[in-house]
Image (spheres, grey):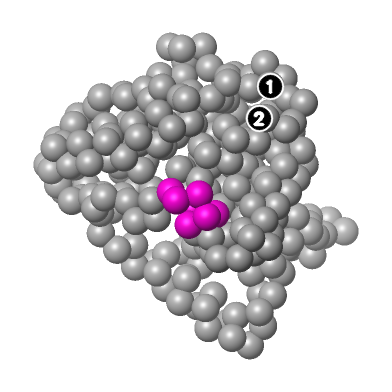
Amino acid sequence: MSRKRRQGIQGRVRSKVGRALADYSMTRDGDRLLVAVSGGKDSLALLHILETRKSFIPVDYQLEPVFVSLGEDDDRARLRLLESVCRNLGLKLQVVSTDIGRRLRRGDLPESNCFHCSRWKRRALFEWARKEQISKIAFGHHRDDIIETALLNLFYGSNFSTMVPHQRLFNGALSLVRPLAYLDEREVIAYCRLKHLPIDQPPCRFAADDQKRMQIRDLLLRLEKDNPRVKSSIFHALKNVRADYLLNVGYDR
C-alpha cells in the first residue's frame, strides 16, 4: 500500500470519527468510556482509533476496554488477542465473567442465540459500568450496522427506527455512543489492515447466520449495483424524517 493511500485511509477515518463525536457530543473532557470489545474488527478498530487520536485532540478522556466472557473455553483465544492489542495501546483489559454460555447451551430460546447473547452481554456491561461509576459505553457499530438495523426494523419489526449514535438511558444516568457511525464497514476493514489489527475474530460456537440480516445485506448489494449511493441515501433519510407525511392515525389536519 502506498504512503499516500495509507495517509488517505487514516485521514478519512480520523475525520469521520471526529465529526461523529462532535455532531453527537459523544465525549467530554475528563470522560471515562467503557469500550465494549469482543475480539472482532469493529470493536478493535474503535479502541485503536479512540486511543491513538488522544495525542492530537484537546479533549482528554480515559478508555476502559471491557470484554464479557461467556464462560467458555473458546474465550481464551479472544482474550489472548484482546490482551495483546490492549497491551500495545498501553491499556488494561477488564474481563467480566458470566454464565451466558451455559444459558445458551440450554436451548429452547424464543429468539436466536445471537439475540439473547447480545442482550445478556449488554446487561453485564451495564452492571459493570454502574459498579465502576462509568456513565458512558462505546460500541463499535458502524454505518452499515445502522442502515441494516433500520431496514430490519422496517421490514420485520413494523417500525422505522435504528441504533442511534448517542443514546441516553435510565433518565440520562447512562449513555451509549457509537463513534464509528459515519464509517462504512469497508473503511473499518481498511483501517484494520493499515494498523495490522485482526479482521477475522475467533469463531463462536453459538453463532449462527442471521438470515434476516444476510437478506438485508444481499438486498443492499443488489441495489448498490444500480445506485452506488443507495446506502448514503438511506443513512441521510434517517436524519430527514418528514413526520407530516407519515401515517398518523387520528391526526386532524
- Give the percent coordinates (x, y) of residue 241: 76, 58
User: Which quadrant does the C terminus fall into?
Assistant: bottom right
Q: Which residues are magenta?
A: 191-197
Residue 188 x, y percent position in the rendering: 54, 55
Crowd around label 2: few <14 · some 14–19 · many ≥20 (10 Å): few
**Residue 153 drawn above or below residue 56:** below
Q: Residue at left 64%, top 64%?
A: 5
Q: Is residue 224 visible?
A: yes
Q: Which residue is mark 1?
A: 60
Residue 123 vs residue 185: left or right?
left
Tally of numbered tags = 2
**Which residue in the protein does label 2 denote?**
54
Corner quadrant of residue 36:
top left
Q: Residue furthest front?
A: 3
Give left or right: position of 126 versus 81.
Answer: right
Depth check: give the residue in front, 211 or 83. Answer: 83
Residue 154 in sight: no
For the residues labelled 1 and 2, the Cα–Cα distance comes to 7 Å
User: Tag 1, which secondary structure?
Assistant: loop
| Quadrant assignment for the N terminus | bottom right
Q: Find residue 222 and report its horizontal and vertical position in percent.
A: 53, 83
Do the residues under discs 1 and 2 have CB atoms within 8 angstroms? Answer: yes
Residue at 31% across, 40% down: 81
- Amino acid type of the residue that numbered disc 2 sits on in the rendered structure: Lys
* Residue at 57% from the left image edge and 32% from the top image edge: 51
Q: Amino acid at mark 1?
A: Asp
